[in-house]
Amino acid sequence: MSGARVLVLAVVLVAWPAVLERFPQRWRPLIGAGTSTALAGAAGIPLGLRPPQLGAGLRLGGIVASAVAAAVGASPALQPVRASMRARDIDLHPAVWLGLHIPVGTVWSEELAFRGVLQPLATEAFGRTAGSAVQAMVFGLAHIRPARAAGDSIPGTVLVTGMFGWLLGRLRERSGSVVAPMLAHLALNEAGAVATLYLGRSNVDLSPESASN
């Protein structure tokens, strides 16, 4: 794919969160996952979901996921992290957040789009180093709107998310499978969500309405 087409895809991925917000919250995970799956299918890029790449992805991803989960689990020991988690308002039922929005709406959707499709195409167009940088930068920029909605620092979110996106890209490269970055991404978000739910349990909405979101 030409560099121009890759950049068009990058712009679309950055703008996608704004498009997704137009749909009811309850449908966003399925719409996002379906769109990313269709994109990956149309691109026809191997995702490493069969042996031996699958095994490599499970091994490497499992190791990194364990380290990530441990680090996130220990992070509330830092007062700023603990305060931020306690202050967060959670408008999703915990089961919906942990069981649908994170694994399907975030991890599956983003890993297919960014590491499954954008990274290989950017690498083909610009080379390995530049391609990885493009993927990481676009991943960071795609989190501007979510950061604004959450009241988080936009520059900080873009920087940290971009760095994490680069790491996830390296996992994809080394294992040959999107499973490795999926596991690491899942560990980060699920561990962070569990810690947030525990520390901010007074802010958790357990009403039946929250379960339907």
Image: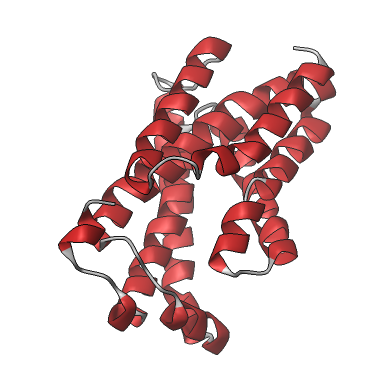
User: Which residue is at the front of the view, 72 or 210?
Assistant: 210
Where residue 210 sits: x, y (%)?
A: 25, 60
User: Which residue is at the front of the view, 57 or 186?
Assistant: 186
Q: Can you say which quadrant of the picture contains the N terminus?
A: top right
User: How many numbered marks, from 0 up?
Assistant: 0
Up-down: is 19 above or below 164? Answer: above
What residue is at 53 percent from the left and 80 percent from the top?
A: 81
What residue is at 31 percent from the left and 60 percent from the top?
A: 92
- Residue 196 visible? The answer is yes
Where residue 78 sits: x, y (%)?
A: 53, 85
What residue is at 60 percent from the left and 34 percent from the top?
A: 114
Up-down: is 48 above or below 209? Answer: above
Where residue 35 sits: x, y (%)?
A: 47, 26
Where residue 38 sits: x, y (%)?
A: 46, 18
Query: Which residue extends farthest bottom?
Result: 79
What residue is at 62 percent from the left and 62 percent from the top?
A: 148
- Residue 59 visible? The answer is no
Q: Is residue 153 left or right of residue 186?
A: right
Q: Is residue 107 left or right of residue 203?
A: right
What's the coloring here?
secondary structure
Up-down: is 123 above or below 157? Answer: above
